[in-house]
Amino acid sequence: MENHRKMEIIFAVDKNWSIGIDGDMLFHIRTDLRRFRDITYGHILVMGRKTFESLPGQRPLPGRVNLVITRNREYEREGILVLNDLDKLDEKLNELDPNQEKKVFLIGGGEMVRQLLDRCVYAHITKVQESYELFDTSIPNLDEDPEWEIVYMSATQTDGIRDFAYVDYQRRSERKYVEFRKPE
């Protein structure tokens, strides 16, 4: 891994690591959305244009820096920062947070994860215990990637509709986090 600004990913996935369809998430789990807010609040969110446009009201998430990456040089929306060149991501992140006091979260979409996964060192994954047949967006399966290991797994929970668990991964080369934690 080159010397890039370290990032974390945070996603809800089904059993096949699918995350969305038609510009929306596959599922909306209230406790998971609250967890997302709690983990990312006060930090920097990096996302592609389609992910931004899938946010409620196409508005930035409050209490966080919303950095949208798009090739469209004309793109602008109130309350967000736009970056048109992925090669300038580190420069922009250092400008926004020169002392690296904030975490940087990659929140979507699938194409952005494929392009930036090599910069990510930690992953907060909500695993829904079912497979969805209809999806058009997925992310790489960290269970099948030898560079990643599970460091935390919650007990199975339910929102009354589906069962899920929180599973955290870290890049093996970044073993600064705690060893595997047992379910709560």
Image (cartoon, rainbow, N blue to C red):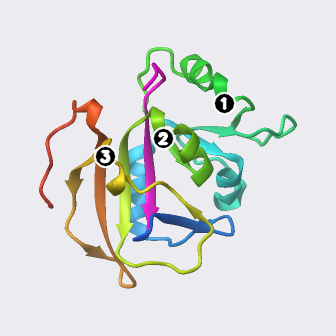
Residue at 78 percent across and 38 percent down: it is: 71
Is 110 displayed left or right of 180 in the figure? right
Disc number lying in front (1 or 3): 3
Q: Nearer the N terminus, badge 3 or badge 2? A: 2
The x and y percentages for residue 62 are: 57, 45
Residue located beneath label 3 in the image: 146
**The quadrant where residue 35 appears:** bottom left
Where residue 117 is drawn, which disc sits there? 2
Where residue 86 is drawn, which disc sits there? 1
- The one nearer the camera, 142 or 37, is 142
Q: Nearer the N terminus, badge 1 or badge 3? A: 1
* Kind of element beneath mark 2: helix
* Kind of element beneath mark 3: loop
Instruction: Please tell me how crowded label 1 is: few (under 14), some (14-19), or many (20+) other residues with Cα within 10 Å.
Output: some
Alpha carbons under labels 1 and 2: distance apart: 13 Å
The x and y percentages for residue 174 are: 28, 31
